[in-house]
Image (spheres, rainbow, N blue to C red):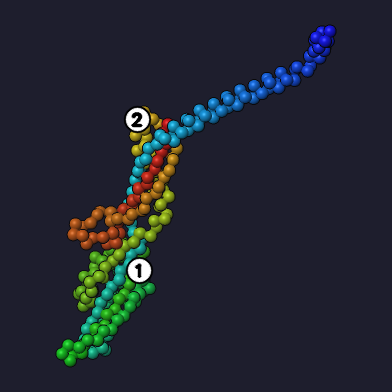
Amino acid sequence: MAEDSASDFESKTPFLKEPATRRWLASSAILAVGLIIGGFALGDGLKRAQLANRAVTVKGLAERDVTADLATWTIAYSSTAGDLPTAQASVDNDTVQLRGFFKELGFPADALQTAGVNVQQSSDNGVASFTVRQRLTLRTTDIARAQQAVRRQFDLVKRGVMLEDGSGMAYTFTKLNAIKPKMVADATTDARAAAEQFAHDSGAQVGAIRSATQGYFSIEARDGDSGSGTWGVSDTPYKKVRVVTTVEFYLK
């Protein structure tokens, strides 16, 4: 009787079994979905790991010929005499000749500035002498006119002006910041071309940039050294700007 009563009770109350079954099915479904998602995530993670390990590092070069936009010429000259007024008068005459020389070439008066004056006194066997040394600096953005002045500097010798060693025109390119962005872009493009060649040879494709390092910009004489070792970048207005970048690309 007891067994029949229990059987009758269960048959009359089937809803007591259904919630447990549903909970089990729901848990199984969630677990299955989790395994599927985990599998995709694991597979994608392995794919990314493999991609991260496939990379190529190349260098890109960009060059540009430029012309200096600033010329400076420090002119040193001196005179020695037995007395200070005579030495000073000789230097003053040289100054007049120099200013006249640059005026004839078309430079404005303020392009030439006094850079310094020095007086030295010495004695040789009791005979005193005075040396007056002066420096003038020409500063101009008129490069063509500056070159003309250099070509005609021996005219100063004809005027009696003797320039000291170290007097020379220096040409400077001051607009590097204006061309940097485009040159970096060109160097990166050059690097990608090298990476694509490497990828083609290895049966791969070039992906995104993994890392990049910009090299330093160098400014050199466009036509190189004269061969004597005395020709430098400042001696010519014609220069070459170079930059090398190192870029690492993903391969896929």
Q: Residue 56, position in %: x, y?
A: 37, 37
Residue 207 appears in the figure: no
Quarter of the view holding residue 26:
top right
Quarter of the view holding residue 199:
top left
Residue 245 versus residue 158: which sits nearer the camera?
245
- Helix, strand or loop for disc 1: strand
Residue 234 appears in the figure: yes
For the residue marked with disc 2, what is the amino acid? Answer: Ser
From what the image shows, is residue 135 above or below residue 45? below
Q: Residue at x 25, y 54 (%)?
A: 223
Left or right: residue 133 compared with residue 192: left
Residue 203 versus residue 109: which sits nearer the camera?
203
Quarter of the figure that contains the C terminus: top left
- Return the residue at label 2: 202
Q: Residues within 10 Å of mark 2 (few under 14, many from 20)?
A: few
Distance from Cα at disc 2 to Cα at disc 1: 56 Å
Tag of residue 139: 1
Left or right: residue 118 compared with residue 128: right
Q: Residue 59, position in %: x, y?
A: 35, 43
Q: Residue 128, position in %: x, y?
A: 20, 90
Left or right: residue 68 compared with residue 33: left
